[in-house]
Image: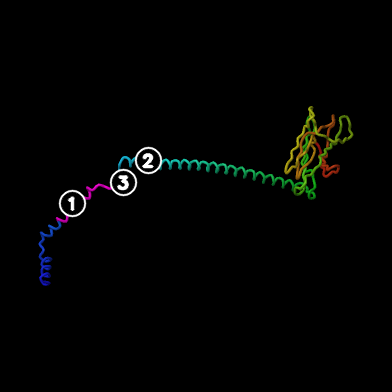
């Protein structure tokens, strides 16, 4: 039996006719085509929301797309608003920086000028008061004045409180004798003082009442106004004195040439 089976197998492989091979290939091709046709005709499994590509499903997709676009547009609007606020804040910050730089430059320039003038004027003991400048001008209604009083060194913890006294020496009309008078602030017809006081650099509360020659400052104070002159009196020199109580703390003489 074994010999017969082996002989048959060898006969099958060696003597298989060529036309049989072509028949097998054709049959296999027909089988594959029929299977593909059956698969193509099978309906798709129904989805939970309806058939694929239905109007309902397309409408749902359009609605979702519209919602996404609306959300994106809202986010873009908020982003534009935020960008505008950032740009505005940046512009305001740059303007403040510019103003600060300008103020710092002004402060530096004033400090340099103050240091220059302090070098020109003789310095006194620490905390002492000095008349650093006095100017006078002849006016139709009196004698205009401008005085700067300073305290040497650093500003003290307590302000200096005192008073400015201005005396003038001159001649009255028709007389050759020199006369010295103490000048007071000019008052107008309403009784108000025709003078003003400008406190500078760490001023205290400043003068009180109608006394425009009062002094109250920590480091320096400038006073300016108009002094009354006696009728017919022509001043030729003036002495500016700083009084603390009845004690003269500083004085400066000024020759008047009008």
Q: Identify the mark at residue 34; answer none if there is no mark.
A: 1
> Is 155 situated left or right of 8 in this image?
right
Picture coordinates of residue 165, whole percent (x, y): 83, 39
Q: Which residue is mark 2?
A: 63
Picture coordinates of residue 162, whole percent (x, y): 81, 42
Q: Is the magenta region chiefly helix, strand or loop?
A: helix
Q: Quadrant of the C terminus?
A: top right
Say few, some or many: other residues with alpha carbon within 10 Å of mark 3 (under 14 / 14 to 19 / 20 or more).
few
Q: Is 180 inside the magenta-drawn segment?
A: no
Residue occupying image coordinates x 46% and y 40%? 77
> Is 84 situated left or right of 48 in this image?
right
Residue occupying image coordinates x 57% and y 42%? 92
Q: Identify the mark at residue 232; answer none if there is no mark.
A: none
C-alpha distance separating marks 3 and 2: 19 Å
Q: Identify the mark at residue 47; answer none if there is no mark.
A: 3
The colour mode here is rainbow
Q: Quadrant of the N terminus?
A: bottom left
Query: Regarding mark 2 in the picture, which secondary structure is present there?
Result: helix
Q: Nearer the viewer, residue 4 or 17?
A: 4
Give whichever of discs 2 and 1 has the lower sequence position. Answer: 1
Q: Nearer the viewer, residue 106 or 54?
A: 54
- Part of the protein shown in magenta: 26-46
């Amino acid at each position: 039996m074994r010999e017969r089976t082996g002989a048959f197998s060898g006969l099958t492989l060696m003597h298989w006719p060529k036309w049989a091979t072509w028949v097998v290939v054709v049959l296999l091709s027909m089988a594959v085509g029929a299977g593909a046709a059956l698969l193509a005709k099978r309906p798709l499994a129904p989805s939970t929301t309806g058939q694929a590509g239905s109007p309902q499903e397309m409408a749902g997709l359009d609605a979702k797309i519209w919602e996404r676009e609306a959300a994106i547009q809202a986010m873009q609007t908020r982003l534009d608003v935020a960008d505008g606020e950032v740009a505005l804040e940046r512009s305001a910050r740059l303007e403040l920086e510019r103003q600060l730089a300008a103020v710092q430059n002004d402060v530096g320039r004033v400090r340099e000028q103050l240091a220059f003038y302090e070098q020109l004027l003789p310095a006194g003991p620490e905390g002492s008061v000095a008349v650093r400048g006095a100017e006078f001008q002849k006016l139709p209604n009196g004698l205009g004045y401008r005085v700067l009083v300073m305290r040497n060194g650093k500003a003290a913890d307590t302000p200096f409180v005192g008073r400015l006294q201005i005396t003038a020496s001159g001649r009255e009309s028709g007389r050759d004798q020199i006369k010295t008078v103490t000048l007071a602030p000019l008052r107008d017809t309403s009784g108000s003082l025709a003078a003003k006081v400008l406190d500078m650099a760490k001023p205290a509360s400043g003068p009180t009442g109608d006394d425009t020659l009062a002094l109250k400052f920590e480091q320096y104070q400038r006073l300016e106004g108009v002094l009354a002159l006696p009728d017919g009196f022509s001043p030729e020199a003036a002495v500016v004195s700083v009084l603390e109580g009845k004690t003269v703390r500083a004085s400066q003489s000024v020759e008047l040439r009008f």
